[in-house]
Amino acid sequence: MKNAQILVLLIFCSFSIANAQTEKGRWTVGAQVGTLTFQSKSNFKSFAASLRPSAGYFVTNGLILGMGIPITINNQKSDFDNYRYNHFSTKAIGLAPFVRYFLGRSQWKPYVGLSYSYQKISGTIKNDDTIGLYEGTTKGHTTALVPSLGIACFVNRSLALTLEADYNINHQKQHTDYTALFGSSDSDIDTRSLSLAIGFQLFLGK
């Protein structure tokens, strides 16, 4: 009888802790890595990375309103021979308000989310190809509407690891000014893509 009472107590405590992880009034801070790629071949190298630190507040049980800071880096370098090369580098940073809702009361909590981001882009271009030698600077912005579906594994009441699938609806505008006689160019591109993001979240408060 005593063992049964202890078992019931442990189950009740586990349920209470799991339910309290996402209760109203708590804060969360964390970060997600959405892209991290490196490629190196004989005459081509590239590196791309995206990071999004974020903070949010539980306005009701399970529902977070928050803000992220998306940061993106993209570098490409092609060296064809001693006389021809192509170097391209961009950086982007912005803001991304989001809403996220956690489902269930277990330590494995699925969630759905929606975010909208705006990022300023800046970069440099340096080419030596069949057209000639030229350099350039690029500026612009990108916006993204991102519905998401993920799962959070709560290690304890204050820490969760996350895996998230994102559907990215992007719009990007860029203007590039070239040196010498090559003038300038503009791009206006809409893209849609799927991506995965992994990360962690710290949960603060009572």
Image: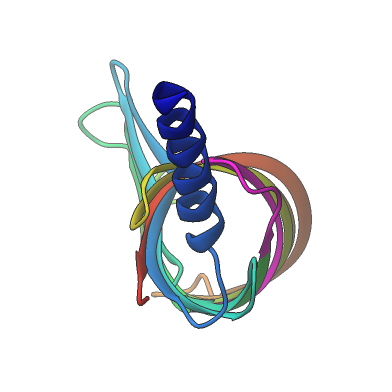
Residue at point 78%, 50% (across, down): 192
Residue 84 in which image quadrant: top left
159 horizontally vs 32: left or right: left
Image quadrant occupied by the C terminus: bottom left
Q: Residue drawn at (54%, 46%), measured in percent from left and top?
A: 15
Q: Is the magenta region chiefly helix, strand or loop? A: strand
* Residue 118 forms part of the magenta stretch: yes
Position of residue 87 measured from the top left corner of the image (x, y, whole percent): 33, 49
> Residue at (51%, 54%) from the top-left corner?
16
Q: Nearer the viewer, residue 168 or 115?
A: 115
Q: Horizontal placement of 118 versus 17: left or right?
A: right
- Pick the residue in front: 12 or 111: 12
Q: Give the total of numbered labels.
A: 0
Q: Report the span colored magenta.
A: 101-121
Q: Residue at x 32, y 17 (%)?
A: 41
Q: Position of residue 130 (x, y in %)?
A: 47, 41
